[in-house]
Each structure stands twice: as structure tokens, then as C-alpha cells.
Image (spheres, grey):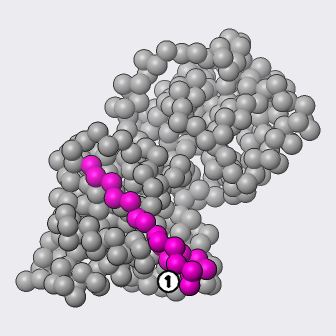
Amino acid sequence: MKIAIVCYPTFGGSGVVATELGLELALRGHEIHFITYRQPVRLALLNSNVHYHEVNVPEYPLFHYQPYELALSSKLVDMVKLHGIELLHVHYAIPHAYAGYMAKQMLKDEGIVIPMVTTLHGTDITLVGKHPFYKTAVTFSINKSDVVTSVSEDLKEDTLKHFNIKNEIHVIPNFIELDKIRNEKHISCQRSVMANKDEKIITHISNFRRVKRIPDVIKVFYNIQKQIPSKLMLVGDGPERDNAERLVTDLGIDDKVIFFGNSNEIDQILSYSDLFLLPSETESFGLAALEAMAWSVPVISTNTGGLPEVNLNGFSGYLSDVGNIEEMAQNAISILKDDTVLKQFRKQALSQAEKFDIKNILPLYEELYRKALENSKSLIN
């Protein structure tokens, strides 16, 4: 199949998932065309089946805000015609499904019928989509998609609850490439750079938005380090970072916390980690937790959104109510204080992650692609 993938090219979970999905599809013989405004951060153009097309938005003085959706839809039309693309897979309802629908209509006028698969990742529904300014457009975009998927049962239920959706929503969870991780486990360990031999390494990775509850991460760690010698690795950047740095200073733990900012060394950091903290207000799936578990790192998280579908309470880690800092800290300590317990939780975390191996998830997408193509061909005939 010749598939166009439209996504955000940033460090965020949806962009990472879309990129990894496209790369794996290319390895399976599909021709993949990434179409976005910048090369995705995890995209390596080392495969003859992988192509990248940049969307340029020309500046025009009439527009106060440059119309990215218009530029994207035009680019999609051009690339479909030039490369014979058979299917669009867009990640995020707006602006991508909205632009995809416009492209479909333009192509239809030229006798080209192309199906569009839309994957909902969360923010397009839980934050942006519910805003009165966008709700109508989000509803329209989902209903005009040929196939709709969501990354968790919780997100599916949330979408159906808040929007008048007529389409069926297929749940296909996010995934992890375990073979890639197994190949990287020979990484020479420089753990001593970040922590002493007797210290545990606790990690958090996010975009440092308010929903991630970064102060809770720091406060949970503050309680842990009172009983367990440990260091906290904070990976990522965003609007809450300055406040986080001030809180670390106020608590007097500057020497125990490392701020990495956005990093391409996430796998190395996770390979050193003993525990992962994710006390978010909500998570549509919890990809960061899954990535940690794939490195055999148990997770302390909240029980909101899709997290209970990923992190099994008492098995791969523990779940707590949002804001319950004391319980999260005690659960963390119960894992870290005994090396035998920690070893067991590590083993169980990896076992849970194996359910989300890309080899199990990719065929689900391929099957939906085939059905979408069959349906589009029947419309032509």
C-alpha cells in the first residue's frame, strides 16, 4: 500500500507513535509518505520506502495567522496525484482530519477517491476538541473520516460522551518496539554519571504542561528520598519547568534533581532508571509509562484516563488517585526498599509491556487499511 501519514513532527506522543508506525509499515513493504511542516524528530530517512514532504505555508500580508490547513490540504492533493498515494492516515482530528477531508473533496472532483483513517490521541478530544470554538469542526472531521481509531477505551468513551459521533471508533492502543529496545540493551552503562552506586534513579518524562502535575512529581520524590537514597531525572521541557526548578530549590534538593530538557537520549536514561513517576491529571493512554515498562521500569501513576489500561495496579507498578502524593510515595518506597521486590516488579513491567509490542498492534492497522481501501473501491465501482 502507498500510505500518507500526517502528524505533528514534535517530541509529543502522537508524533512519536505516527513516526514509528510509518517506519515499521515501511519495513513491511508499504510505501510511506510523511507529510508535515517539519521532519519528525524520530524519522530517519534510511529506507527506500520512506519519503518526507514538507508543507510550506507562504506568508501573505492579508492573513494575521497563516492558513496551515489550506497549505496542508493542497500538499496532500499534490502528493496523492504525484505519487499515487492510496490512503491517508491522519493523527489528530484537527487540523489534520479537517485538512484531509478538504483534500479528499478536491481529489473527488478529479475522479480520485481516497479513504482517510483518523487516529484520536487525546488532546484533540480532551482539551482542544471540547472548546466551543472547535467542537463543531472536531465532530465534523471525525464523522467525515472513513475509519476512526482511538488509542484507548477511555478515550473512545470520552469521545462518544462529548461529541455526536456517528462513526464506529476502533480502539488500537499505542505500541512499543521491543526488538529495538532489546538491541539497545547492550548500551554501555554510565549510570555513575547520574547517581551513586547506592542511589536509586527515579525518572519522569513529559512536555511539562500543567496536566502532567510536575509539582506532584517533585513532591513524591521528595518523600521518597527521605527514606531511599535516590536521584530524580526530569526529562522534557514546557511551561511548568521554571516553577519546577523553583520548587526543587525551595525543598533544598537541587543536588538530587537533574533537568535534562528535551533529549534524544531517553532510551539511555530509562535503561538506568529504577522507577518511573507519572502523576498526571489525565492521560489518554500513557505512552511514557509504556516506554518505561519496556525498559523493565515499574511505574507509579495516577488511575485516570487510559493509564489503568497500561499500568496494572500491583503488577507493573501502582495506581493512585490524582494528587495522592503520600500514597504514591509509599508505593514507590515499597518497591524500592527491597531489591528482590524491585526485581520482580521489573520483570512484571516488561511482561505487561510485551502486550503492546508493535508486532501485535501493527496488523490491526493493516486490517483497517485493507477494509478502508476495499470500501473506497466499492464506491468507485
Residue 172 drawn at (x, y percent): 37, 58
Residue 225, image x and y in percent? 80, 27
User: Residue sitting at 60 percent across and 27 percent down?
Assistant: 273
Q: Is residue 147 left or right of residue 247?
A: left
Q: Which residue is mark 1?
A: 137
Q: Which residues are magenta?
A: 50-68
**Vertical side of 308 occupied by 253: above or below:** above
Q: Residue at x 41, y 74 (%)?
A: 71
Image quadrant where residue 239 sits: bottom right
Q: Main secondary structure of the magenta part?
A: loop
In this rendering, would 52 be left or right of 163? left
Q: Is residue 133 magenta?
A: no
**Residue 78 on image: x %, y %:** 27, 71
Using the image as rendered, state which of residue 11 and residue 357 is in the foreground: 11
Q: Residue at x 46, y 19 (%)?
A: 187
Q: Amino acid at mark 1?
A: Ala
Tell me the residue at 58%/77% (across/down): 65
